[in-house]
Structure formats: C-alpha cells, structure tokens
Image: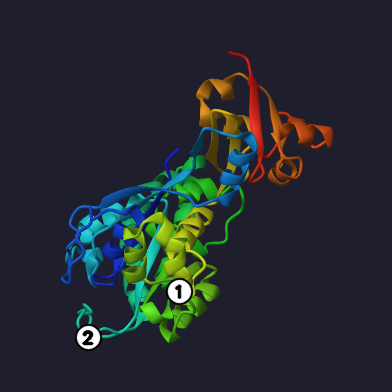
C-alpha cells in the first residue's frame, strides 16, 4: 500500500534542499536556478513514531520496522504552467499521480537566492500555484463533461451522478476556489475523488524559514498559517538549511545540535507526521520477539482490511483479530499483563481499527 505526497512549489523555494534532507541523500540537485529538478525524485521515508520503540523494548523484538510514506520532489512550477509554460505539462502530469501535496513556500529573505517573480510573498506564491492547478482542472473538466452530459440527458444513471459531481467542481473552480472545498455526502466522496482533480488533493503548506526562525516562525510563516486556517488546510514551519545540516550529522550529535537552536526534534519529523495524517492514515502494530512492525491503513478501515495489508490471504481467510490498545499494552508491560488486566480483545469483521492497536490475526489458510 503506497502513499505519495508530492513536494511542489515555485523554483528556488528550497524544495530540493528539503527533499535531500528528507531522504538523507543528494539525489535531487539543489541549485540556484529554475528547473534544476527535471525528473521527479522519489524518496521512501520512515514515519517517526516513538511508540514502536517502546513496544519493541517490552517484547524484546530483534528488529524494528517502521511504517513508511513516499515523497516525490516535483519540478518547479511557473506562472502559465496550465498552458504548458516552463515545465508545466510535466509538472501537471507528475502532480496528478500523488495523493497529497506538500506545498513548499519561501518564507525567508536572501539576496543571494533569486525569486522567480522578484518578490517574497509566500501567500501570493501559494495562490500562483493553486491558480495554475485550478485552471488545469477546469480545462480538463470542461472537456470531459461534454460526452458525460449527453449520456446523462439520455437517462444513464451513472452518467447523471458523474455529471452532477463534475458540475459541482466546475462551479467552484469558476469561482476561483479549489475542488477540495466541495460539500459532499459520504457516498459522493469516492466518485468525486475518482475525477482525478489536482485541487481536490489535501494540501500541507511547508513554510521554509531562515535558520533563526526555525523554532517560532516569522511574519511570513504567520501569514501562511492564517491562510491554512481559513482553508482548513495544514501548515508546518521548517528550515530546509537546518534540516539539511541535521541530516548530515551522526545520530548521537543530532539531539545536542537541535537543543542548541531551541528545537525538540527535526522539523522534518513534523512534516512527515503531518503528511501522514493529511492522507487520512493511521498505524497499527504487530509485535513479537522476531520484530516489532508498524503497518499503515486508512482511517475507518475494518479488521479484515488491516489483515490484508500484511497478506491478502489474511483478509480472505479472516476469522478474528486479537487486539490490545497501545496504552493497555504499555500499562500491562506486554500481552500477558494486558490479558491479566482484561484488556485483551477478540474482534470480528466489523471492528474499526484504532490508531496504535497491537494486533494478531487468526485466519483460515
């Protein structure tokens, strides 16, 4: 089960520097000129979760395997991308393939780094990118809706439903609003998602600040935070330069360095966790002497679906899920203590998995 978060933004905002730190590689060339990232770079990163280390310590697990999320560093966009300007067509094709958008915004002043539009305005930058995505979505829908409308007028039920959803999105886009602002019923959400609209994807605004603002942000990041609040989006403050430096340090030196600049943890940890949450994901665990392992499911998944993440045979032959809540596992110092405390549960097919559940599946082979 792969989940992709695309790193997007205007050229020279720190996307590639951030990506390099994120994957602890120099795979993405960070340089002070537009389009230095030509092909999207892909990095698979562990989701920081201190719970798994505590579980592994109790179970004396030989190996720890965290859950992961994929970040894609996508070429810089410029005004006019929806019409093919710059690397517009490639940018749009790449962004359609991700599940969520991490939108990096320049929230720092530096005369040595050129801004593609000659000014520092992160909210304006965000609107530039969003406008290009909205224009591309609108053009796509207006083209696709014509044959759907004909079928809908002919009485085809599925086409009627699709036409209604496309019309709802078009109305929003014509008002200059992203498709994710649509009010949808529970039944409409999946078919709406299948329209493949870029502005329907959830957004995380990543405020790339100067080193001195890494702990508390600055006036630019505060503007972005307010924009995110208005939209119901998410934002994080991060200094790509600091993250790049932290990524190059030995693990033993990182904590001391972070404390010296007033940070409790790398900003990237917050970014990864927020991206994970943005995608509507939760974690459950399997724990034993061989390994403690984190697994990813979408919020609302039932026990058989969680079993299927481990192996399809587990889902098909699902019988029961032996389940202990994370807090109960810790309080009982393991499975035996949780059993003695009456916190061990046998859950059936309708059980909705909770974040942090420690599970073992019974199934017919």
Measured Cα–Cα span from mark 1 to mark 2: 27 Å
Residue 2 appears left or right of 60: left
- Crowding near the residue tagged with mark 2, few <14, some 14–19, many ≥20 C-alpha atoms within 10 Å: few
Query: In the rendered view, would you say 246 is above or below 227?
Result: above
Quadrant in the picture for the N terminus: top left
Mark 1 and mark 2 in contact? Answer it, CB < 8 Å.
no
Number of callouts in the render? 2
Name the residue nearer the viewer: 126 or 242: 242
Question: In front here: 166 or 137?
Answer: 137
Residue at 62 percent across and 14 percent down: it is: 364
Q: Secondary structure at mark 2?
A: loop
Could you tell me which quadrant the C terminus lies in? Answer: top right
Vertical placement of residue 352 versus 7, above or below: above
For this rendering, which residue is in front, 156 or 298? 298
Which residue occupies 55% across, 68% down?
A: 232
Image coordinates for residue 155, horizontal then vertical, percent: 49, 42
Q: Position of residue 320 (x, y in %)?
A: 70, 25
Q: Nearer the viewer, residue 293 or 197?
A: 293
- Residue 262 drawn above or below residue 44: below
* Res 155 visible: no
Q: Which residue is mark 1?
A: 260
Identify the element where label 1 is drawn.
helix
> Residue beneath label 2, please?
111
């Amino acid at each position: 089960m792969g989940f992709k978060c695309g790193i997007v933004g205007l050229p020279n905002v720190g996307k590639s520097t951030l990506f390099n730190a994120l994957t602890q590689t120099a795979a993405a060339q960070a340089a002070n000129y537009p389009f230095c990232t030509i092909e999207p770079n892909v990095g698979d990163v562990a989701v920081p979760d201190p719970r798994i280390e505590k579980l592994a310590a109790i179970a004396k697990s030989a190996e720890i395997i965290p859950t992961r999320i994929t970040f894609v560093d996508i070429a810089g966009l410029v005004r006019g991308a929806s019409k093919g300007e710059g690397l517009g067509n490639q940018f749009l094709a790449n962004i359609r393939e991700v599940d969520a958008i991490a939108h990096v915004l320049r929230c720092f002043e530096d005369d040595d780094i050129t801004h593609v539009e000659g000014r520092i305005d992160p909210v304006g930058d965000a609107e530039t990118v969003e406008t290009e995505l909205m224009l591309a979505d609108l053009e796509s829908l207006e083209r696709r809706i014509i044959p759907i409308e004909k079928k809908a007028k002919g009485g085809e039920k599925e086409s009627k439903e699709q036409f209604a959803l496309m019309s709802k999105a078009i109305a929003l886009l014509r008002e200059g609003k992203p498709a994710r602002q649509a009010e949808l019923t529970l039944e409409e959400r999946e078919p709406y998602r299948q329209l493949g609209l870029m502005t329907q994807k959830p957004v995380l605004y990543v405020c790339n600040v100067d080193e001195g603002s890494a702990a508390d942000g600055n006036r630019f990041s505060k503007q972005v935070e307010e924009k995110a609040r208005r939209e119901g989006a998410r934002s994080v403050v991060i200094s790509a330069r600091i993250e790049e430096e932290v990524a190059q340090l030995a693990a033993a030196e990182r904590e001391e360095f972070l404390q010296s600049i007033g940070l409790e943890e790398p900003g990237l940890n917050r970014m990864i966790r927020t991206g994970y949450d943005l995608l509507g994901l939760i974690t459950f665990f399997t724990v034993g002497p061989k390994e403690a392992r984190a697994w990813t499911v979408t919020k609302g998944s039932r026990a058989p679906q969680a079993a299927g993440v481990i192996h399809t045979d587990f889902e098909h032959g699902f019988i029961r899920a032996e389940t202990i809540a994370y807090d109960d596992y810790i309080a009982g110092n393991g499975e035996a203590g949780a059993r003695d405390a009456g916190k061990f549960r046998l859950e059936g097919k309708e059980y909705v998995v909770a974040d942090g559940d420690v599970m073992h599946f019974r199934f017919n082979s």
